[in-house]
Image: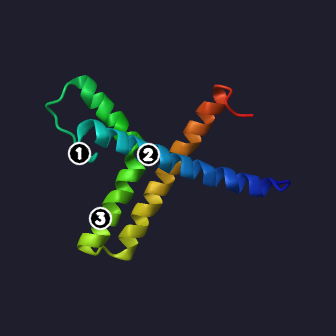
Amino acid sequence: MSDPHTAAVLLNIYSLALGFVVAGITASAASVVTGEPLKFEMTPNESKLMLFIGTCCRIIAGPFMILRNTFFSILVAGREPYWVMIAIVIASLWSFCQGVILLETACQFGMCS
């Protein structure tokens, strides 16, 4: 792997995949704890701590929820292709940024070689 461009492309793909994996794990964990799928809507009558935890979970699990809702809307409502593409691009950018933040944080703690 002597080409630096190849290494950069692979690192970007890894960041994207890492963001999606963390989003999926977070959404699945929240679903196991609450017993229902994680949604963007929140109930206002919860405590401030639960609102904070719920907001953090939704921020981390956002790309997964966008894609889950997008694929569900394709099957049920038959969405137009451009709406599907916009949702995929938004979820991918969100996931990529999340993956970069996770990798940078891991490197700051000395987990990168």
Residue drawn at (30%, 40%) of the image: 32
- Name which quarter of the figure residue 44 lies in: top left
- Of residue 76 and residue 9, the one placed in the foreground of this image is 76
Measured as percent of width and height from the top left, residue 75 is found at 29, 71
Q: Mark 2 highlights which residue?
A: 23
Q: Which residue matches tag 3?
A: 72
Which numbered mark, 1 or 2, is in the foreground of this view? Answer: 1
Amino acid at circle 2: Ala
Relative vertical location of residue 14 with respect to residue 56 in this rendering, above or below:
below
Q: How is the image coloured?
A: rainbow
Q: Pointers 1 and 3 in contact (CB under 8 A)?
A: no
Assess disc 3: are there few (<14), some (14-19) or many (≥20) residues with their C-alpha within 10 Å of its C-alpha.
Answer: few
Q: Is residue 7 above or below residue 26?
A: below
Q: Judging from the image, what secondary structure is the residue with disc 1 in?
A: loop
Find disc 1 in the rendering and name its residue: 36
Q: Amino acid at mark 3?
A: Phe
Type of amino acid at the residue the image marks with label 1: Glu
Cα–Cα gap, marks 3 and 2? 17 Å
Q: Is tag 1's residue or tag 2's residue first in the polypeptide sequence?
A: 2
Ranked by sequence position, the earlier of labels 1 and 3 is 1
Instruction: Name, please, the residue furthest toward the right.
Output: 2
